[in-house]
Amino acid sequence: MTAADPRAPGNSGPGNSAPGNSSPGNSAPGNSAPGNSAPGNSGPGNSGPGNSGPAEPFEVWAPGKLVLMGEYAVLDGGPALVLAIDRGVRCTVQPGGEGVAIETPDGDDRFVRPALATAPPGTYRFQDWNPVELPGKPGFGGSAAACVAACIAAGRPASDALAIHRSVQGDGSGIDVAASIHGGALRFQGGQVEPVILPTPVVIYSGQPARTGPRVARYRAWSPAARAAFVAESAALVETFAADPVAAARAAYRLLCAMADQAHLAYRTPALDRIAALARAHGGGAKPSGAGGGDIAVAWLPEAEAELSFQQACRAEGLVPILIHAAPGARRG
């Protein structure tokens, strides 16, 4: 089990590879820089709105995220643990021309257009950075990463992405935006971040994407008293996670499943249950990352040999491991 140190982006657990994953050449340049710098401090040219901008093309890289612990409770101010990863969004900027032209892979520019409202004229082309070639699209916080990248590309503070993303999405804790801005492994609570050292998970795709919005709405409709008790239990697991991630992951999955049953929230799936069972069979613990209902699971195993055996068992059942590395915060390159 390898630690994800925010001061040393690029660490990953042994054997965390999967067939068809992108090659190392798909990673962003400059991954040796610390990921916990101040929002918007990504280098020359990141000046305020209204500047004419540089004449030369440039790129902005914004990492995605994995929530490791504290899902749902973070919406009520509880602590959570999150890891910025090297699967996010890249924005290529070609200055010049008339007005602002925006290109996205699917034509959806809701999360980037408001950030580019004050951008200098040019073409702003958004692409997945280090995408996973799988059916469906694993949820790594792409909309938050795109919003952060757009802010930096426009020459405005990266922290502007929090309000912009929330205004478009309609809800959320801001943990995905914070991870993309600061990078590395973080403890997040109430909008505040603290760099921490966390064990890197094995990441497994359950085989189907999942929508976060309806699940968050169900959680919000749950009784305040029940949510308060849930948040307290979740917070206790966050605090013990680094010392024993296997036990914490097992307990967190039980807690989240109980919450989902009481809140009538579609959280468990047969694939997620199977990933958790395979992790237990290899001496580890696993849980969904994020809202559940499909998407991805994160697992921790006691040793490298167990990690490899667990991944092989998952592959044998069509549950694909995804290679990830810790990544620094969004920056201009």
Image (cartoon, grey):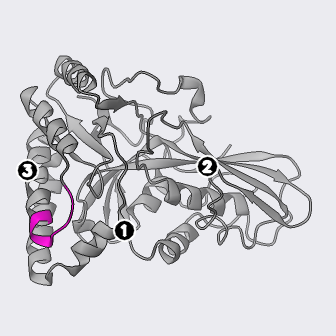
Q: Quadrant of residue 303?
A: top left
Residue 36 visible in the displayed image:
no
Q: Earlier in the sequence, mark 3 or mark 2?
A: 3
Q: Could you say whether the residue bearing mark 1 is in a helix, strand or loop?
A: helix
What residue sits 71% from the left and 63% below the top? 155
In reply to whether residue 275 is colored magenta, the answer given is no
Q: Secondary structure at mark 3?
A: helix
Q: Which residue is mark 3?
A: 251
Q: Residues within 10 Å of mark 2 (few under 14, many from 20)?
A: many
Residue holding disc 2: 331
For the residue marked with disc 3, what is the amino acid?
Ala
Q: Toward the viewer: 188 or 43?
A: 188
As drawn, 133 above or below 256: above
**Magenta stretch in the rendered image:** 260-267
Q: Is residue 4 left or right of residue 29?
A: left
Up the image or down, 282 lies above or below 132; here it is above
